[in-house]
Amino acid sequence: MGRSCLADRLEHYVRLTDREQQALARLEENERPVRRGAMVRRERDNSTELFVLRSGWLFSSILLDDGSRQIVRLHLPGDVIGLSAAAFGESPEAVVALTDARVHPFDRGLLRDLFEDHPRLAAIVLMLAKLDYVAVVDRLASIGRTPARARVASLILETAGRLRITKPDLGRGFDLPLTQEEIGDATGLTAVHVNRMMRTLVEDGVIARSGSRVEILDEQRLARIAKHVDRYSRLDTGWLPAAR
Amino acid sequence: MGRSCLADRLEHYVRLTDREQQALARLEENERPVRRGAMVRRERDNSTELFVLRSGWLFSSILLDDGSRQIVRLHLPGDVIGLSAAAFGESPEAVVALTDARVHPFDRGLLRDLFEDHPRLAAIVLMLAKLDYVAVVDRLASIGRTPARARVASLILETAGRLRITKPDLGRGFDLPLTQEEIGDATGLTAVHVNRMMRTLVEDGVIARSGSRVEILDEQRLARIAKHVDRYSRLDTGWLPAAR
DNA sequence: CGTCCTCTTGACGGCTTTCAATAAAAGTGG
DNA sequence: CCACTTTTATTGAAAGCCGTCAAGAGGACG
């Protein structure tokens, strides 16, 4: 599969024309390795490049002046990163690598080309943006309105669900390459309390852990604990423009 | 000004062509009154209509199964509401009227037309979506990483800032048509604690209140308290496709 | 083999919630 | 316009969840 990984992802939703595939392939003509811990983009950075993530995990975060950090979103392979920076001319979020990764950077001029020549792909970009939006909204509800245990459960569940989209054979276990401090930054907790909450989840037999590996033992109960709002986030492609 | 209120808003960012203005006018051919407290859209509602808000305030919210609620976003005149529902074929959020309001409903087929015939307007729609995204991200950081007083301060500051976009002559005072319970649902707090925090803000001379009217007495201090991340969210229109 | 990072656990304190009661305001129907 | 009801605002006291501080253990990496 030397194909575009973005195309691979979009094929889950629509059947792409050859011309559309070619347009997407242009987004991935360049490739850049990124090392674990590297800051791919700083907050307020005025670089307007976008990325397609080919392999590895990144995250977007906001830094507050007192040094605390809010992790907003994890990025998995196939994600398009930096739409906000392209739209604002300045990045509202920092982007950091959780693991070694490879990204395909491309100029926002190519995004414009998509809007001009491929209305259907442009509409799909909007849908991807809205997927991110809904994910952040769910995290907001989790942090704003559920206790610590539910927030941790929710993060595990959401991540497992996203991994399953591309790897349906995931089984119940997966690697979660986040330190407990990072999990805390994503859930609005301290590392210490994340530790305690994960311990209770293990003690209750809901999950198992060894190192960074997480295994979901009782998904139904995990979902109840997380107060998980089950969206079958299937995109509705019924409104899309005709392909070109 | 019988003109499109969406066009009015977009003119702050770009100069619209006649053809673009006509396309936008089509979105506002219908009008519907909404009464205070009315639920314009239920969660999981499979209506895919969109709205332009002409007058009044609405909010989007998520309901959790234990009855608690997270208010995600306030909607002010000129906002486009329901893009997510259009993209997913089902609304991820409930939409409720805070005040009596008027909305312009339109079919998502018109959104498709925008993508096909007006690439620049389509790109602007993406930018508007990203504006919402960044607003929710900021709220996320506020709720996840700041104490109660900062969250309340942040909500007041953000709302004042948004109102000033359309009414630069706002002065320091404005009407905030939210109950303290609703402020709590927006900031992840209880109504009781919202009350206490607002009282400290009043006692410290940062704001004044009477009824639902809020007056900002010391904006700099309010911003410090809120740990406000100052984004001059000017949109960068440099990448947009040519107008048609 | 030493250093640094991460994980783990306990004790304590503080911020926020919960519970409760009253006052004030807004909405309703006569 | 006035009683009546319902909603909203306000305040105190007590309890609980989570953060802070501290110390030690285990691992990764040079």
Image (cartoon, coloured by chain):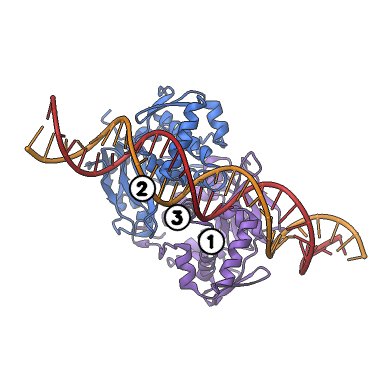
Chain colours: A purple, B blue, C orange, D red
Chain for mark 2? Answer: B
Compared with residue B5, is residue C7 higher up or lower down, i.e. above or below? below
The residue closer to the viewer here, A101 or B183, is B183
Label ID, residue A149: 1
Q: Is residue B38 left or right of residue A172?
A: left
Task: Give me the residue at 43% from left, 56% from top.
Answer: A127
The residue closer to the viewer here, A112 or B91, is B91
Q: Mark 3 points at which residue?
A: A134
Compared with residue B121, is residue B176 higher up or lower down, i.e. above or below? above
Residue A55, horizontal then vertical, whole percent: 63, 64
Label 2 element class: helix
Q: Name the residue under label 2.
A: B114
Residue A160, horizontal then vertical, whole percent: 54, 68
Task: Give me the residue at 22% from left, 43% from top.
Answer: B30
Chain for mark 3? Answer: A
The residue closer to the viewer here, B90 or D19, is D19
